[in-house]
Amino acid sequence: MPTDARWLAAAARLALRGRPHSYPNPSVGCLIVKDGRVVARGWTRDGGRPHAEAAALADAGDAARGADIYVTLEPCAHESPRGPACSDLLVAAAPARVIVGQSDPDQRTAGRGMERLRTAGIAAELADCPASAASLAGYLTRAASSRPHVTLKLAMSLDGCIADAEGSSQWITGEAARAHVHSRRALADAILVGGGTWRADTPRLDVRLPGLEQRSPMRWVLTSQPIDGAQSIAAPADIAQIPAQYLYIEGGAQTAASFLAADLVDRLEIYRAPIVIGGGMPAVRDIGLPELAQAHDRWQRVEQRMLGPDTYEAFVRTRTGG
């Protein structure tokens, strides 16, 4: 039988269906399980409503009574003109247990959702689930740091180059890797490149996968100069003003360095092609690292796979103190 952790991990994967269009709400996943079988599921819909729990309960009907309900984020406990509090909906549904992946940092709910369930006699358990936290990275980063969660994507050769000495870069990686990049774009509210990249290439920065074209993110450029066709910020710290939970950065080398130097990158996604360029343009410019020792223990690899001939690796920034 699947454990609570496995059901929550499945709910976290389900939550991806609502990302990023649930903004400004987090994308939450909910599974209703009875006798070891999923009887209903829900995720946060476009614009944040209905919430995942409301969608799953509507699907389950009377089957929710006595069931186990797995939800990645603490059920909301505040009233809204857009719908009732999910904790009240859960109380009315009378499940046996509600297992929650992450507490809600929103002070209108924090702890109150769990308390309301327990007061009603429902066994409410906080699992502190890593998969749930990862699925809520944008929401949790916004709550803790008042900015989007930042992913920096780099596509490079084995020797760390993004182009030859003349700047030609089409194409470093193969078709499978490029398709994967588009799938990652589809999970972001906003995408950003540097002013030099924008003026030199006028990149489309959209999603060109069949059925996902409508998930193309808002286009932003890091530049202090006027531009057409996108919105702009003048410095990495200005990302706080971007109305997004997830920001995907694609380049170029100086932009990558600027965000790394400001310690604003939460996730690194590196695509490495099995080629050596030699004397080419580096993927990242100088980040002002005072000594090599400070480069260690900053990144933890969380994913690795082959995409055709290319290697994909994802790393998360390890930070202490939250």
Image (spheres, helix red, strand yellow):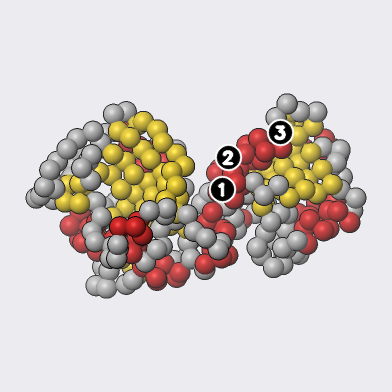
Which mark lies nearer to you, 1 or 3?
3
Q: Which of marks 3 and 2 is in front?
A: 3
Q: Are marks 1 and 3 in contact (CB under 8 Å)?
A: no
Kind of residue at disc 3: Thr
- Pick the residue in front: 33 or 278: 278
Q: In this view, does 267 lie to the left or right of 167?
A: right
Q: Which residue is drawn at 52% across and 60% down?
A: 320
Instruction: Please tell me which residue is depicted at 76% across the width and 64% down the height of the picture.
Output: 79
Q: Name the residue under label 2.
A: 13
Q: In this view, does 24 lie to the left or right of 205?
A: right
**Residue placed most toward the observer, 195 or 165:** 165
Give the residue drawn at x 25%, y 55%: 284
Q: Give the labeled residue for mark 3.
A: 3
Query: Residue 81 location, x and y as percent?
Result: 72, 65
Q: What element carries label 3?
A: loop
In space, the residues marked 1 and 3 are separated at their CA atoms by 19 Å
**Residue 106 appears at what percent x and percent y?**
66, 65
Q: Are the residues at dot 3 and dot 2 in contact (C-beta closer than 8 Å)?
A: no
Residue type for callout 1: Ser
**Contact (Cβ within 8 Å) of mark 2 with mark 1:** yes
